[in-house]
Image: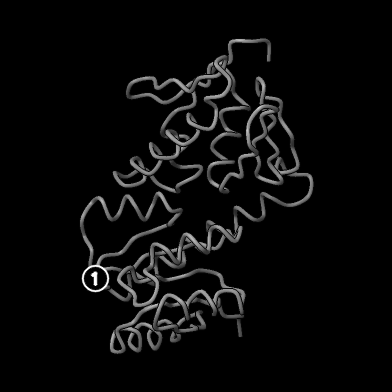
Amino acid sequence: MTDKHPILLVEDDDDLGYVLKTYLELFEFEVTWAKNGVEGEQQFHAGQFAACLLDVMLPRMDGFELAKQIKASGSQVPIIFLTAKALKVDKLKGFSLGADDYMVKPIEEEELVARLRAVIRRSVVKHDSAAPNATTSKVYALGQYTLDVQNQTLHHPEAKLIRLTEKECQLLQMFVEHPNQLVTREEVLHKLWGKNDYFNRRSMDVFITRLRKYLAADPQLKIVTVYKKGFVLEVMTDY
């Protein structure tokens, strides 16, 4: 018998929560079900999970805030939002908070299983690549900055230490390893987001904007958009 993947489900609708928990446990998942955001955060810190399924419209703490708290803890656990909110602005907000996927209700159970398997598989590959001897132990000099990949920090001697999210760090590392070279949108999307679609492209643009703000203290550094192709980290001093 194979080990089951522990899943945190945070859903305040009793009927939907019961259906999803029961259905997922027919497969390779063991589900912990919380019915509000505060309980969800407590359960998250009390256990170890392979993925989180978060409703957005939750009592006591909404799903967006819960995702923010989970990511702020330094966790790399994949997050899928389950929500009735189908507006693009809500989906983009979810992805900007570090969500790995976003499903609009009514939820198709078979599709949910497939998406869960996909985000868990990507997470396992990501962790395998972060094993000893991998590039996560590297420290890079970037103009006036120092990028510490292992600790996910960006330091400038005259500015406050910036703590990066995992994806921010991975994206910046891609640019740092290819200074003054084109890094294609396609390459970034497939390596860091898993696929090239509208919402992932918009999420990527949000992360690019963040990196530009982080690097603003050094006028010799600039992330330039190459129309329809990708991005170039321009380093205007010796690298």
Percent of width and height locating residue 24: 42, 81
Q: Residue at x 46, y 53 (%)?
A: 98
Relative to 166, is 60 on the left or the right? left
Percent of width and height locating residue 135: 71, 40
Picture colour scheme: one colour
Out of 144 and 85, give the one closest to the viewer.
144
Q: How dense is the environment of label 1, judged by Cα within 10 Å: few (below 14), some, or many (20 and up)?
A: few
Q: Residue at x 40, y 80 (%)?
A: 36
Residue 144 position by quadrant: top right
Percent of width and height locating residue 78: 50, 62
Q: Which quadrant, please, contains the C terminus?
A: top right
Give SS at disc 1: loop
Residue 1 position by quadrant: bottom right
Location of residue 25 with respect to 135 vertically, above or below: below
Out of 23 and 174, give the one closest to the viewer.
174
Location of residue 51 with respect to 209 vertically, above or below: below
Query: What residue type is disc 1 on?
Result: Lys
Location of residue 182 with respect to 70 vertically, above or below: above
Percent of width and height locating residue 182: 49, 21
Q: Residue at x 57, y 73 (%)?
A: 49
Relative to 51, is 53 on the left or the right? left
Which residue is identified by label 1?
105
Q: Residue at x 55, y 76 (%)?
A: 5
Residue 156 position by quadrant: top right
Out of 10 and 39, give the one closest to the viewer.
39
Relative to 228, is 184 on the left or the right? right
Farthest residue, direction top:
237
